[in-house]
Image: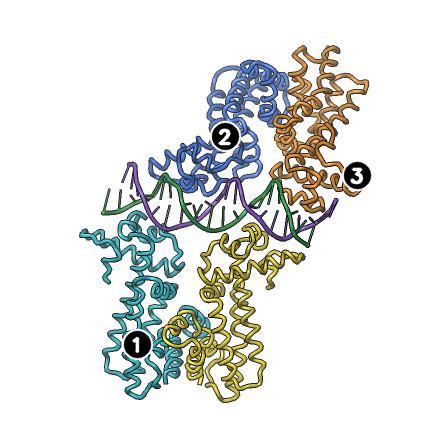
Chain colours: A blue, B orange, C yellow, D cyan, E purple, F green
Amino acid sequence: MEKENLSVPSSRKDANRNVHKIMEAAKVVFKEKGTEAKIEEIAEKAGVGVGTIYRRFVNKERLVWAVGMEIIEEIRDKQRIDVDLSVPADQKIRLILDEFLLLHHKYGQLHEMLITLSQDTPFGEEIRHILSDVLQVTIREGQEQGIFRNEDPEILEAFVLHIVNASLIKRLRSQMDVEDIPKTIADFVLKGLS
Amino acid sequence: MEKENLSVPSSRKDANRNVHKIMEAAKVVFKEKGTEAKIEEIAEKAGVGVGTIYRRFVNKERLVWAVGMEIIEEIRDKQRIDVDLSVPADQKIRLILDEFLLLHHKYGQLHEMLITLSQDTPFGEEIRHILSDVLQVTIREGQEQGIFRNEDPEILEAFVLHIVNASLIKRLRSQMDVEDIPKTIADFVLKGLS
Amino acid sequence: MEKENLSVPSSRKDANRNVHKIMEAAKVVFKEKGTEAKIEEIAEKAGVGVGTIYRRFVNKERLVWAVGMEIIEEIRDKQRIDVDLSVPADQKIRLILDEFLLLHHKYGQLHEMLITLSQDTPFGEEIRHILSDVLQVTIREGQEQGIFRNEDPEILEAFVLHIVNASLIKRLRSQMDVEDIPKTIADFVLKGLS
Amino acid sequence: MEKENLSVPSSRKDANRNVHKIMEAAKVVFKEKGTEAKIEEIAEKAGVGVGTIYRRFVNKERLVWAVGMEIIEEIRDKQRIDVDLSVPADQKIRLILDEFLLLHHKYGQLHEMLITLSQDTPFGEEIRHILSDVLQVTIREGQEQGIFRNEDPEILEAFVLHIVNASLIKRLRSQMDVEDIPKTIADFVLKGLS
DNA sequence: CATGAATGAGTTTTCATTCAT
DNA sequence: AATGAATGAAAACTCATTCAT
C-alpha cells in the first residue's frame, strides 16, 4: 500500500512539491481542528488553490487517509531507530514512549484521526500492523531478558500503544511540568509490564 | 447543574417522555457515529420529528451536553456504590474499572465525546470532578493501606481514568475473550499503581 | 417503475405540491437551456430553496429522469385518447403527430433529453415502450384497413416517432406558417407509410 | 470561412500535425459524449497536453466549431460527387442518404452538435447552406423529371435532411440488419417525396 | 405541541482556462 | 512550442435550524 494509491502520482517536481505542501498544511490544520477542517483552509495554508488539492487527492477522504498514513510511517521510522539500539528492553520502551509523546505534541487532534483510520479504512490492517510491530519485538526482548512478565506480548503491546492517548496527555499537562510527563508515563507503563 | 438547564422543561408527561426517547436514541446514534451524527437520524431513531428535538434542546450542542451529563451521572452513581463497600482499595479499583468497561461497552464512541465535553464546555470542570472524585478517594485509601505507591493521587487517578479508552478496548476485544478483558486491564493498572 | 423511485415520496400535501412546482419549473428551465441548467435556477423559478429540490430528488440526474418520465407519460396519455377514436388509421396518425408537435412546441430542448434518457438510463426500455405502443397499434390497424403498406409495423413506427424531431421543426418553422407544419409533416409521413 | 479562422495558424509542420490529431480526437470524443466532453479527455486521446489545444483553439467553443465545420465539409464533398453523376434524381437521393448514414455511423452524437451549431453560431448560415444546397438541386431535378411531387423543394429538402437523425438510426439498428437500413430509409423518404 | 418540509449558508467538487517550467 | 500543474469561479450538494400545517 503505497502513497501513490492515496495521492494521484505525478512525475513532475513542482507537482510533488505541492503534494508535500498540501500534506504539511493538512497536518497543521487537522491537528487544530480535526478532520472537519475545510479544504479551503488547507489550500490557503498550503498556499495553493483548492483545485490543486483535488488534482492530487481524489476527494477529502483520501487526503485524510494520506495524512494519516504519513504520520504512521513517521512513527514507524522513529521506532525502528530505537529498537536497533543496544540497551535493555525497558530503556527501549522509554525511548519509544518518548517518541509517541513528541508525535502527540506535534499532531494533537490527529490521534483520534489515526484511531478512526485504523478502524474504518482499507488501510486499517496495515496501520495496526505498523504501530504494533516494533513494540512487540521489544516486549519479547524484555521477556527474554526477564525484565517483563510473561503475558502475551500482543496484549502488553496493546497497553503500551494505547495508553499514550490525547486525553491522558492533556490531563497530565494540567498537573505537571511537561518535561516530567514522559518519565511519569514510562514509570507507570514499565510497572504494568513488570 | 441539573438536566433542566440542558433540556427545556415541560409540565406535560408526554413531553418528558419525548426527552427520554430522544436522549436514548442520541446515545445509541452518538455511540455509533460520534457527534457528527445527523439530528434527523436521532429523530428517526427516537420516533419523533426533528422539530421535537429542537423544542426540547436549544441546539445540537446542548443535546450533546445533555447526553454527556447523563452518562457522567450514571458513572458517578455506579462508582459511589463501589467506593462505599468495605473491601481493600485494589478490589475497589477492580470494581470501578469493571463499571468503566460496562459503560464503554454500552456507549462506545461516547468516551471521546466525554473527553471533548470535559475540555470544551461550561460543564468541563464539573465533569472532571465527577470522574475524578471517587477514584482519588480510593487511591488515597490504597496508599494509606500501603497497597499503592506514594505518587501524587491525582496523577495515578489520571492513569486509571484514561487507560480505559475506546481504542484499547477495541484492540483487546480482537485478542481475547470479552470476559477476560476486565481482569487483564485491572492487572495492568494495579501493577502500575503498586 | 413508478415516480416514487425518482422523487422521494411524502404523504404530506405541501411536500407534493412542491414536487409539482419543482417539476414544472424544471420543465421550463430544461426546455430553455437543456440539462445543463443550474439547480439553483430551477429552485428560483419554482420558488423553493435548493435544499427542497435535494430533499425530493436524490441528485440532479434523478430530477432529469423524473421530468423526462412525466413528459413521456403526458405523451402516452394524449396518444391513448387518439387511438380510441373511431376514425381511419391515417386520421389517427395525423392526430398523434399533432400531439407530438404540441409537445415539441411545449418542451423544445427536452426532445434531446428524452432521446438521451431512452438510451442511457434504467428507464430507457420503458420509455421506448411507452412511445412505441400506441403508434404500433395504429399502424397495424392501418395495415388491416389496407391504408398502409405491409412493412414491419415496428419499423414504420420508428419513422413516425423519430421524424418529429427538434431540428426538423425548427427548420420548418423558418419556412412556413406554424399552423401549416402539422399538415405538412403528416402528408409526408402518410406518403411514407402508404 | 476557412479552417484558419478557427484554429490558430502555424508554419511548423508538427504544429499542424497536432491540429489534426486534436481534431480527430475531438471527433471521437464528441461522438461518444457530445459537447460536454472534457478538454482534458480530448487532449489525452490526442496525445497532447491541454495547453497545446489552447494554443491551437482559442477556447472550447472554437474547437467545437472547427470539428463541426470539418464534418460539414466532408458531407459536402461526398454529396458533390453524387450530384454530378448522370442517374435519375431518386437514385441520387438514395446515394446522398447513404452518405448521411455513413457519416452518422462515423460521428454519432455529432449530429446534434451540428444542429446546435447551425442554430447558435456565426457559421450557422453557412452550415445550413452547405447541407441544403446539393439536396435542393437534386429535388428540383426530380421534380423536373416528374419523379417528385411539386411541393416547395426547400421543404422537401428539410425532410430528407432531418429524417436521418441519431435516434432514428439507433432505433433501426436494433430492429434490422445494418446493411438494410439505407434502403429502408430511402424507401420511406422517396415515398414521402413522390 | 408535534411534525417534517423548507431553508440557505456553508462545503465539497468540477473543469475551462492560464501559465510556469 | 509543448506540457500538464495550478487556478478559482461556478456548480453540486449537505444539514443544522426554522416554521407552516
The residue wearing badge 2 is: A72
| For residue A93, above or below residue C122 | above
Tag 1 subunit: D
Indicate the position of residue A102 as horizontal and vertical percent values.
51, 21
| For residue D165, above or below residue D139 | above
| For residue A70, above or below residue A91 | below
Which quadrant: the C terminus of chain B? Answer: top right
Using the rendered image of the protein, determine whether residue B99 is visible from the camera's viewpoint: yes
The mark lying in front, picked from 3 and 1, is: 3
As shown in the figure, which amino acid type bears the numbered disc 1? Leu
The mark lying in front, picked from 2 and 3, is: 3
Disc 1 crowd, CA 10 A, few/some/many (<14, 14-19, 20+): many
As shown in the figure, which amino acid type bears the numbered disc 3? Ser
Residue D135 circle label: 1
Q: In the visual, does C186 lie left or right of B165?
A: left
- Where residue B159 sits, quadrant-wise, is top right
Disc 3 crowd, CA 10 A, few/some/many (<14, 14-19, 20+): few
Task: Label 3: state its secondary structure.
Answer: loop
Q: In the visual, does D193 lie left or right of C62?
A: left
As shown in the figure, which amino acid type bears the numbered disc 2? Ile
Along the viewing direction, whichever of C48 and A156 lies nearer the viewer: C48
Indicate the position of residue A192 as horizontal and vertical percent values.
64, 19
Q: Residue furthest left?
A: D11
Residue lying at 30% horizontally and 47% vertically, measured from the top left: D51
Tag 3 subunit: B
Task: Label 2: state its secondary structure.
Answer: helix
The residue wearing badge 3 is: B11
Q: CA distance from mark 3 to mark 1?
A: 86 Å
